[in-house]
Image (cartoon, grey):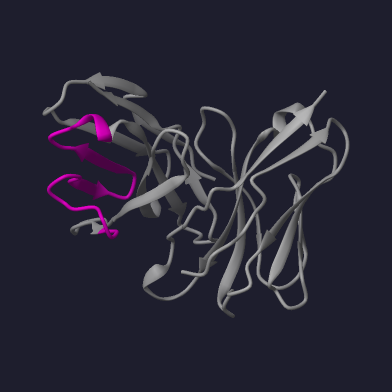
Amino acid sequence: SAVISQKPSRDICQRGTSLTIQCQVDSQVTMMFWYRQQPGQSLTLIATANQGSEATYESGFVIDKFPISRPNLTFSTLTVSNMSPEDSSIYLCSAEGLARDNEQFFGPGTRLTVL
Amino acid sequence: DAKTTQPNSMESNEEEPVHLPCNHSTISGTDYIHWYRQLPSQGPEYVIHGLTSNVNNRMASLAIAEDRKSSTLILHRATLRDAAVYYCILFNAGGTSYGKLTFGQGTILTVHP
């Protein structure tokens, strides 16, 4: 299994600013993902964070708005850029272990409020 | 992506079995059936998954129809801690979609004392 932590756990930000969310896994993992969960909604995949290369974004999400880094097998960051109130959501990272047994582990999420 | 259909909500009493249904009529041969649950104010957690045969683990059982077009997650004795949103997800283990989980709206399970 893998334990995932996220920082910050929550934040309140002003419109037009940017926030970087960190995701740390306690063991090496093959794949890492970032999701968004808007209020009262289900999770939507933003992108796959690829180690050593550019992230792969899902339809409707772009790198300029959500730049992602993944410098090694245990860490990734997601930046929410030029924020607007519509970006208020919970952002979650997930990871699949080296065993690739199809089980994914999720972090506790970062609750973002944009004023 | 193949889709799943789940009831919006279900209710159960504590210590009774719960059967959570999921329809996936467009499932392909390489799709695994995954179940995750999300407790309040937490990230989702893996529950169980299967391909063709029924599966059991310490958390639950997964019953898969012979034609694979539907499945049922079984909680043998519900506890208050099992109150959560349960997601049935089709996971394609091959190709460019590997690893991607497509979450539907899930089933909100309420457990009464």
Residue A80 spot, x, y in % from top left? 20, 37
In the image, taking residue A17 as reference, residue A35 lies left or right, namely: right
Name the foreground residue: A59 vs A20: A59
Residue B6 spot, x, y in % from top left? 64, 54
- Taking the view exactly as shown, the residue that stands out farthest to the front is B8
Residue B5 spot, x, y in % from top left? 61, 59
Magenta-span inclusion, residue A84 = yes
The residue at 63%/67% (across/down) is B24
Magenta-span inclusion, residue A2 = no
Residues in magenta?
A: A57-86
- Taking the view exactly as shown, the residue that stands out farthest to the right is B16
> Can you say which quadrant of the picture contains the C terminus of chain A?
top left
The residue at 72%/33% (across/down) is B110
In the image, taking residue A2 as reference, residue B77 lies left or right, namely: right
Residue A28 spot, x, y in % from top left? 39, 49
Q: Is residue A106 above or below residue B98?
A: above
> Can you say which quadrant of the picture contains the N terminus of chain A?
top right
In the image, taking residue B40 as reference, residue A84 lies left or right, namely: left
**Number of labelled discs?**
0
In the image, taking residue A71 as reference, residue B3 lies left or right, namely: right
The residue at 36%/72% (across/down) is B96
